[in-house]
């Protein structure tokens, strides 16, 4: 199929949406599709939006998101149409944004692939907790327009799909759940990871935390779990990637914090891969998470995940198979007790690690995801 892949950010860079914009495009291309990339837009706000952004927070305590408004969306419509006029007519318009599909007016089948709907984000993430009612109204209308425009709607999790169905009027036949893959440019070989798993012991437990947002991702709880293990004379370290919550003076002895590691930098990317190879668990007890790409990345290295039953995480992690999920209010003791159980039963840990590796190869990689989406798009064209 010839697909116009329309995105807000550069689909050739790993920086957009943690690399997901890039990997979605790659997955479609690797599935045998011809891609037309449309991503360069000149979207301009105006004085009215500038004024609202200044005055609304001051007088109402609420914020606006200009991209949710028709005046901005119409700019996308005009610019998308101009760029489509310059290329051979695609068979599908595809995006990683509902707003983009809402803006598409061409009489061509449309689809998009996202990890959440607007209503699902509202009051779930902090960025969506103080939005002005005007923005909420505009956003919901734009979201509904996207669902009306689309022939297929791909969500990365059951949570995202169910939330959208609850809040919007959507033909259920349009909705498909296809998990995102792991954002890894060169995945490790299956046999290599099998050997690494077979050599692991739990004499010293290396916990890995990966996230820019220390609080939302459950960093304080991960820290408490590590401390409890050490208090119980089980040697444990916590390596924090993505943020540096401690100063040199305040950092506990059992914490390492290499900070943000850029995957587009060869040396830093290799350092991150080595952490995935040499850790025993990814611990990321998030308070809110639409999906969690790093869970799939961890599984690619046979690394079991300790996480929470929130958002899209249960689509990725199946307790007892490729990790263990806890209630969002579960205390550090619950995590510590689970780790201690595996510490004394290495065979169970090995089984969990192998389950993580299998989960990646069977359902949490971009090859599988791209093929699943492509099959659905082809079915749509046949009808």
Image: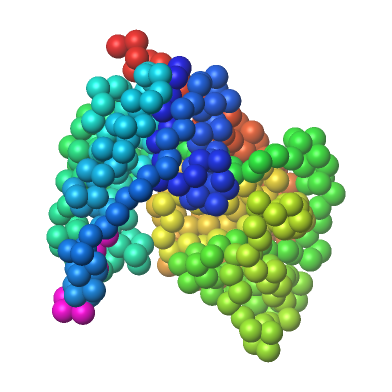
Residue furthest out toward the bottom: 249
Query: Residue 359, percent across and down?
Result: 60, 37
Can residue 144 be seen here?
A: yes
Tell me what residue is drawn at x 50 percent, y 50 percent: 16
On-image quarter of the N terminus: top left
Magenta region, main secondary structure: loop
Q: Work out whether 345 lies above or below 114.
A: below
8 displayed left or right of 71: right
The residue nearer to you, when weighing 118 against 55, is 55
Residue shown at 62% from the left, 47% from the top: 297
Residue 334 visible in the current orientation: no
Question: How has the structure been colored for display?
Answer: rainbow
Is 360 placed left or right of 25 in the picture?
Answer: right
Up-down: is 67 above or below 322? below
Q: Quadrant of residue 6?
A: top left
Is residue 63 a member of the stretch shown in magenta? yes
Q: Give coordinates of residue 263: x percent, y percent.
A: 65, 53
Q: Position of residue 47 (x, y in %)?
A: 20, 64
Left or right of residue 95, residue 183 in this image: right
From the viewer's perspective, is 287 left or right of 336? left
- In this view, the residue farthest toward the top is 382
In magenta stretch: residue 194: no
Q: Which residues are magenta?
A: 58-65
Q: Residue at x 43, y 64 (%)?
A: 287
Check the picture and name the quadrant holding the C terminus: top left
Q: Residue at x 19, y 68 (%)?
A: 52
**Residue 302, quarter of the rendered image:** top right
Q: Position of residue 24 (x, y in %)?
A: 50, 36
């Amino acid at each position: 199929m010839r697909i116009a892949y329309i995105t807000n950010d550069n689909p050739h860079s790993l920086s957009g949406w943690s690399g997901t914009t890039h990997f979605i495009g790659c997955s479609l291309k690797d599935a045998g599709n011809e891609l037309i990339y449309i991503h360069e837009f000149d979207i301009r706000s105006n004085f009215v939006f500038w004024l609202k952004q200044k005055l609304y927070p001051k007088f109402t305590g609420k914020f606006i998101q200009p991209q949710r408004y028709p005046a901005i969306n119409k700019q996308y419509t005009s610019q998308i149409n101009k760029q489509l006029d310059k290329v051979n007519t695609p068979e599908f318009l595809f995006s990683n944004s509902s707003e983009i599909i809402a803006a598409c007016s061409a009489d061509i089948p449309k689809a998009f692939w996202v990890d959440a709907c607007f209503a699902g984000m509202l009051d779930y993430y902090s960025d969506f907790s103080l939005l002005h009612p005007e923005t909420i109204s505009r956003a919901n209308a734009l979201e509904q327009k996207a669902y009306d425009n689309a022939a297929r709607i791909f969500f990365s999790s059951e949570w995202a799909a169910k939330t959208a169905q609850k809040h919007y009027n959507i033909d259920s036949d349009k909705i498909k759940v296809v998990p995102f893959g792991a954002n890894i440019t060169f995945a490790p070989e299956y046999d290599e990871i099998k050997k690494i798993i077979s050599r692991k012991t739990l004499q010293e437990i290396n916990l890995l935390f990966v996230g820019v947002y220390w609080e939302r991702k459950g960093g304080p709880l991960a820290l408490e779990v590590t401390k409890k293990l050490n208090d119980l004379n089980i040697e444990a370290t916590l390596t924090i990637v993505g943020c540096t919550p401690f100063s040199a003076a305040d950092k506990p002895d059992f914490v390492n914090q290499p900070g943000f590691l850029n995957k587009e930098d060869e040396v830093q990317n290799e350092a991150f891969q080595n952490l995935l190879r040499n850790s025993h668990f990814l611990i990321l007890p998030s308070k809110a998470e639409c999906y969690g790409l790093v869970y799939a990345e961890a599984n690619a290295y046979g690394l079991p995940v300790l996480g929470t039953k929130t958002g899209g995480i249960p689509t990725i992690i199946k307790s007892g198979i490729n990790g263990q999920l806890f209630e969002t209010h579960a205390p550090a003791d619950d995590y510590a007790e689970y780790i201690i159980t595996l510490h004394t039963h290495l065979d169970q840990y090995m089984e969990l690690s192998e389950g993580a590796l299998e989960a990646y190869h069977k359902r949490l990689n971009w090859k599988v995801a791209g093929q699943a989406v492509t099959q659905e798009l082809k079915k749509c064209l046949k009808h």
